[in-house]
Amino acid sequence: MTTITIQVNGKQLATEPDKTILEVCRANDIEILTMCHLKGVMDVGACRLCLVEIEGINKLLSACTTKVAANMVIRTDTERIKKYQRITTELFFAERNHVCSVCVANGKCELQQLGYKVGMDHIRYPFLYPKCELDSSHAWYVIDHNRCIMCTRCVRVCNEVEGAHNWDVMNRGTQVRVISDFNSPWGESVTCTSCGKCVHACPTGAIWPKAIVQGQLEKKPGIINELVEKRKMKL
Amino acid sequence: MNAGFTTLSTELPKTDPRVKLLNARIKKEHYRPDALIEILHTAQNAYGYLPLPVLAHIARSLNLPPSRVYSTVTFYHFFSLKSKGEHTCLVCTGTACYVKGAQKILDEIERQFNLQPGQVSADNQLGVAVARCIGACGLAPAVVIDDEVQGKTEPAAVIEKIHSKTGKP
């Protein structure tokens, strides 16, 4: 395996090609904020939180979908990046109806933690207050579109790991929604296997199991990668 | 058996010429899942819109998840899940047509048929829509009635043409 060197925040790092910037940074304890990245499933670069500066390229590139190249000079901690992270976080909150105090994921929500991390103290954008539905037709789980951030982690887990492809995304722009089958109630889905992987993949309180009271939700997004790795093992 | 399953399991009537057309196209594309958009085009042209049982039939034939088919249909503006009406009246509201009185035509349509752009009459006979520009600025104001372009037209002529199409006074 060939080894290449890259520079991240002034630090020289030795790594292998065809790894993403995110993988290299995570392996070297350099923090990069992410929302749509979930270890074990494909990266889509949807959340735009992992944007990094690369010398010689004017625009910011997403660390999760950009492969490292020899002698790449990367910065993850500039004021410009922090500004964009803050904007993105605020837009997440302004886009749907996120009310932490009544959410099952309160205290254990990745979006909430992100807000703390970027130091969000107010939201400069007007809230959209879209009219979103809550679907509790499934016997065990609930999906609340008010709390969805369209990271599509559930969609990818359902397609790639479970292979059921119950979820997908409909419409465009502010009208986008995660849908089950023909935009029919989750409980009537013919493709859903009720495996519960989407529940653990969801970073917020948008998908949760019914037997949970407010603030008691314990999600384990790590089990997705654990499962993927274990399937690769030869017995 | 639940409602979702019923939608997915109902077979389309095999004697329907539209179904024959659709099935021929699916066969021509060798049931390839990546020919979804081409097949949706055929279905939309045959039916005028995409009813759910047709989408279910396509999903089943191409071995695609229903949600994937639905997401493709809702992503592209060309595809419609609701009937656009037996006859369509598309009023161009581009700059040239607007200046030449496209709004007057729309007002007259609303007065005569009580239909606003995007709406379909209760008997499904007439659907009214607007377009940003149909590329016929030299013919402003332009109206497209059932794929027939009416150039340099005026409110009264449009109403008359619609009546002749729908067969009503």
Image (tube, coloured by chain):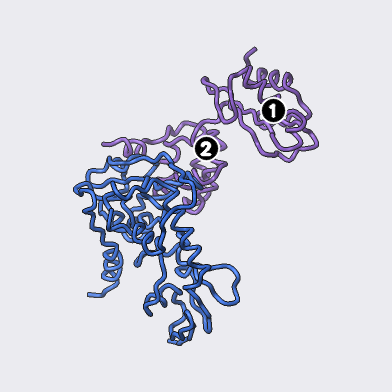
Chain colours: A blue, B purple
Q: Residue at x 37, y 77 (%)?
A: A29
Q: Is residue A82 visible?
A: yes
Q: Nearer the viewer, residue A183 or B108?
A: B108
Q: Nearer the viewer, residue B109 or A134?
A: A134
Q: Gap in Å between the C-alphas at discs 2 and 1? A: 25 Å
The picture quadrant where one finds residue A190 is: top left
Disc sitting over residue B122 in the figure: none
The picture quadrant where one finds residue A156 is: bottom left
User: Mark 2: which secondary structure?
Assistant: loop
Whole-percent x and y of residue B93?
69, 34
Q: Nearer the viewer, residue A80 or A121?
A: A121
Mark 1 crowd level (few <14, some 14–19, many ≥20, 10 Å Cα): some
> Which subunit holds the residue at mark 1?
B
Mark 2 crowd level (few <14, some 14–19, many ≥20, 10 Å Cα): some
Extreme front residue here?
A121
> Left or right of A85: which side holds B109?
right
Q: Is residue B62 visible?
A: no
> Which residue has dot 2 on it?
B80
> Which residue has dot 1 on it?
B103
Whole-percent x and y of residue A28?
38, 80
Question: In the rendered image of this protein, does residue A230 appear above or below residue A156?
Answer: below
Identify the mark nearer the N-term, 2 or 1. 2
Question: In the rendered image of this protein, does residue B28 appear above or below residue B19?
Answer: below
- At label 2, the amino acid type is Ser
Whole-percent x and y of residue A195?
25, 54
> Left or right of A233: which side holds B121?
right
- At label 1, the amino acid type is Gln
Whole-percent x and y of residue A100?
32, 50
